[in-house]
Amino acid sequence: MAQLPALDRRTLENLGEELSDPPGALEFLQLFATMLPRRIDAVETAFAAHATDDAVVALLSLHASAAMVGACRLAEASSTALKSVGEPARYGAEVARLRSLATDFQSALGGIIR
């Protein structure tokens, strides 16, 4: 299976078409990128507190937004991290993976937003 892209431009283009507002889709993408570190922090905080409901909400929010903008690897990783809720031994690795993929996403984003 081929590796998912860090940022699927076609998904972003589709969002712009669905909204009938391509610039609005880019604004949403920028907002997602700005909020990404806080979203991952929220996941980490919930995991550290063993607050499973908060972890699920944070991960679902991250997953939905990532999927909307075409952050495919982040969407997949947040879905995978949902499966580790309730397994504290996996929390650190899941958060580290999300942070690493966020860096990949930000690098890919540089080719779109300047």
Image (cartoon, grey):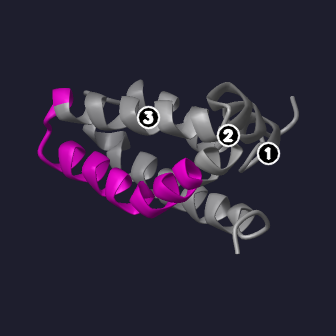
Is residue 8 visible in the rendered image? The answer is yes
Look at label 2 and name its amino acid.
Gly
What predominant SS class does the magenta segment belong to?
helix
Is residue 78 visible in the rendered image? The answer is no
Q: CA distance from mark 3 to mark 2?
A: 18 Å
Q: CA distance from mark 1 to mark 2?
A: 7 Å
Q: Are marks 1 and 2 in contact (CB under 8 Å)?
A: yes
Compared to 83, does 6 lie above or below? below
Residue that appears at 40% across and 52% down: 95
Q: Which residue is mark 1?
A: 9
Q: Which residue is mark 2?
A: 70
- Residue placed most toward the observer, 60 or 52: 60
**Mark 2, other Cα within 10 Å: few <14 / some 14–19 / many ≥20:** many
Q: Which mark is residue 55?
A: none
- Residue placed most toward the observer, 110 or 90: 110
- Residue 91 x %, y %: 33, 45
Residue 30 is covered by the magenta coloring: yes
The image quadrant of residue 20 is top right
State the residue lying farthest toward the right.
2
- Residue 13 x %, y %: 77, 39
Secondary element type, mark 3:
helix
- Residue 24 x %, y %: 59, 46
Compare marks 3 and 2 and give the one earlier in the sequence: 2
Quadrant where the image shows the N terminus: top right
Look at label 3 and name its amino acid.
Ala
Look at label 1 and name its amino acid.
Arg
Compared to 108, does 4 lie above or below? above
Specify the segment rendered in magenta: 27-53
